[in-house]
Amino acid sequence: MNTVGPDDPKHGEEEPPAEATVLRMLLGTQLRRLRELAGIPAEKAGYEIRASRSKISRLENGRVGFKIRDVEDLLTLYGVTGEEQRSEVLALARQSSAPDWWTRYSDILPDWFETYLGLESAAATIRCFEIQFVPGLFQTEEYAQAVTRLGHQAAPAAEIERRVTLRRKRQDLLTRPAPPRVWAIMDEAVLRRPVGGPTVMRAQLRHLIEAGRLSNVTIQVVPFARGGHAGAGGSFSLLRFNEQYLPDIVYVEQLTSAIYLGQRSDVEHYLEIVDQLSGEALTPAATRDYIEQVINET
C-alpha cells in the first residue's frame, strides 16, 4: 500500500464525491437484506439479472457498480412493489453510479486495488501496520518512485510517473474536510531500509515526522529492541466506517491480489493484533524522537 499528493494536471478540477463508494456499499447492504428477507438464494438473484452468484456477491458488497435495470429487476424479484421504497432504492442506485476520481487510472489499476481505494476514501478510521515500506499515505514522491520501480522494473518512465501520481493523490484525504483518523504502526525495519538511497530516506523520515503532527494522524514504531511482535504475519489495514450498516473491513495485500475480510471473528482478531502492536510500539512522542535518531544515523 503506497502513496502521496497533487501534481496531477487535473488535480484542480472538480471531482465526484468519494461518497459514491459508500452509497454502493449501502445499496448493496440493502439489497442483500431484501434478498434474505424474501428467502431468495444468490444464484436465483444472479439468474434474474443474467449474472453469476459471484456477481451478486460483489454487488452486495458494493465492489462493483449497479445498472438501474438490474436494481429494478432485483426489487421486483424480492417483492418490493411499493412505489416509495422502490424510488428510494433506485435514487440511491443513481447516486452511487458517479465515477470515482481514480477511474482515470483504470489502465494501471487492478480491480482488487480499486476496491481498496473506494474503502479508503470512505473510511472514518484507518488503522494499519507495515512491516517493509512506509505506508502509502505518508510516502514522499521520491520514495514512492523507488517503491514503484521495485514492483514494476520493466515499466517505462511515463508509467512509473503515472503510478506515483496516483499514489500521491491518495494523500489528499489526509487534509480534506472531515478527514479520516489514520493510525499507522510500523516495524523499525521500515525506517532502516534505505529505499531510494540515504538522501531519499532521510527526506522520507522527516516527512513522517511532519505527517505525525497532523491532528488526525498517529504514527508509532515498534523498535527491534522489543523483540518479536504481534504483527509478524505481515502488513494489513483495518478500516472502519461511520455508516451503521457498513461492517469493518480488514485488507491484506498480496503480490498480485488482496484479501478482504469482513467476518466479525476475523475483524476482531485483527483488532486484537493492532491493539497489541500499539501497546508494544513506542508512544507517538517517543516515535518522533526515535525517527530523529535514525535520521542522524542515516
Image (cartoon, rainbow, N blue to C red):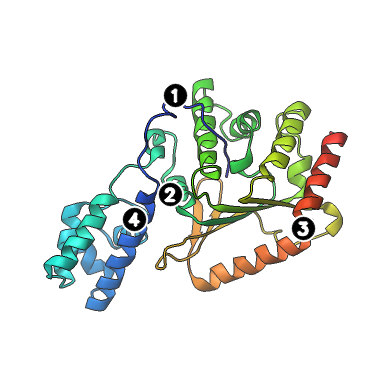
Residue located 76% across and 34% down the image:
194
- Which residue is more in the foreground, 250 or 289? 289
Q: Which mark is residue 118?
A: 2
* Mark number displayed over residue 9: 1
> What type is the residue that disc 4 sits on?
Leu
Residue 88 image position (x, y, % from top left): 21, 62
For the residue marked with disc 2, what is the amino acid?
Answer: Gly
Proximity of marks 2 and 3: CB atoms separated by less than 8 Å: no
Spatial distance from mark 1 to mark 2, Cα to Cα? 22 Å
Coordinates of residue 10 in the picture (x, y in percent): 41, 27
Q: Position of residue 19 (x, y in %)?
A: 38, 50
Q: Nearer the viewer, mark 1 or mark 2?
A: 1
**What amino acid does circle 3 point to?**
Ala
Q: Rounded to the nearest whole Å, what is the CA distance between mark 3 and mark 4? A: 36 Å
Residue at image position (66%, 42%) is 211
The answer to whether residue 48 shows anywhere in this view is no
- Quick one: label 2 or label 3, which is nearer the N terminus? 2
Label 1 to label 4, Cα distance in Å? 28 Å
Crowding at label 1, few (<14), some or many (≥20) Cα neighbours within 10 Å? few
Q: Secondary structure at mark 4?
A: helix
Identify the mark at residue 23; answer none if there is no mark.
4
